[in-house]
Amino acid sequence: MQRQAGSGDLAFLDGYLFRVMVQILKSEGVNESGLYNYYRARVEEVGFALSHYDRMLVDYVQARFDRQSRRIVHAGTGLGTLPCALAFAGYTVAALEQDAGRIRAASQVHAALADAWPAAAERYQLIGGEFPTVLGGTPWLGPKTVLIFTNCVTTWPDELNAKIMASLKTCGDVIMDTRLFGQMRDTPDERYAFVRQLEAQGIDAAPMAESPPDAFYYHLKPTLGAP
């Protein structure tokens, strides 16, 4: 039976992935590598591969979802540090990324994971393309899926936004930072209005007490019988 990944295990994984990210940044540069300023800051200023919310989400998922029956989809994965940690913890994970530079960098991180922990890497599938279209016709979106959005500050076109919102009701559980989903929502009123919008569409939304101070994570579940 796969045991829960503890803080010591994640610290070891973090150090390994951090060295990989440092090497990518040094060898390829900020923009050419696909790290861009977001991950450059993670390397040069933060000093960790796994963010605070990565660690929080790994703990949250492990406490609530069975490894054998549930699968994870991380939309907008960036370098894939969260999927690496979840696969390391025993979950089957699909990570989606659309940016070509980020896909190249995430592929290098995935390859490094495979070098050290091949079984974990086999549980983690990196998929390039636009969510949710790229998952059409696959089993990745369904009642057994836990769909996760972390940093997704992109103003989507109306048609794509409609598809993404519809995808939320296809999954058994959805976890998202309401501040950074689709657009920036810096004020409580903006986040409250978005949560009310979700509830009006038949989605229960419960705030996650575990959120880091600068994040506003919610656990969403489609309401039974909702249209």
Image (cartoon, rainbow, N blue to C red):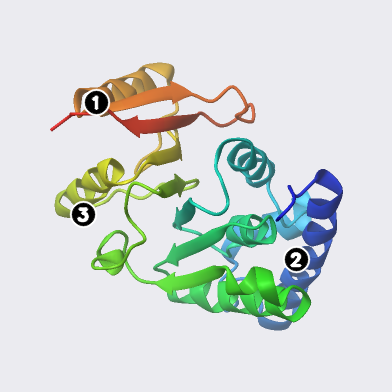
Mark 1: few, some, or many residues within 10 Å (few <14, many ≥20)? few
Name which of mark 2 and mark 3 comes first in the sequence.
2
Q: Which residue is mark 3?
A: 160
Query: As drawn, is 132 to the left or to the right of 45?
Result: left
Q: Position of 166 compared to 20: left or right? A: left
Q: Which amino acid type is shown beneath numbered disc 1? A: Gln
**Amino acid at dot 2:** Leu
The image position of residue 217, as x and y in percent, is 50, 31
**Left or right: 140, with 110 as reference point:** left
Query: Is residue 1 or residue 126 the one in the foreground?
Result: 1
Whether residue 167 is visible to the viewer of this picture, yes or no, is yes
Circle 1 sits on which residue? 197
CA gap between label 2 and label 1 equals: 38 Å
Q: CA distance from mark 2 to mark 3?
A: 33 Å
> Which residue: 36% across, 19% down?
192
User: In the image, residue 4 lies at what x, y percent?
Assistant: 73, 47
Tag shown at residue 5 = none
Say above or below: 68 vs 196. Answer: below
Q: Position of residue 206 (x, y in %)?
A: 44, 22
The residue to which callout 2 is attached is: 17
Gap in angstroms between the C-alphas marked 3 and 1: 17 Å
**Image: 141 above or below 195:** below
Mark with earlier residue (2, 1): 2
Quadrant in which residue 136 is drawn: bottom left
The total number of labels drawn is 3
Dot 3 amino acid type: Leu
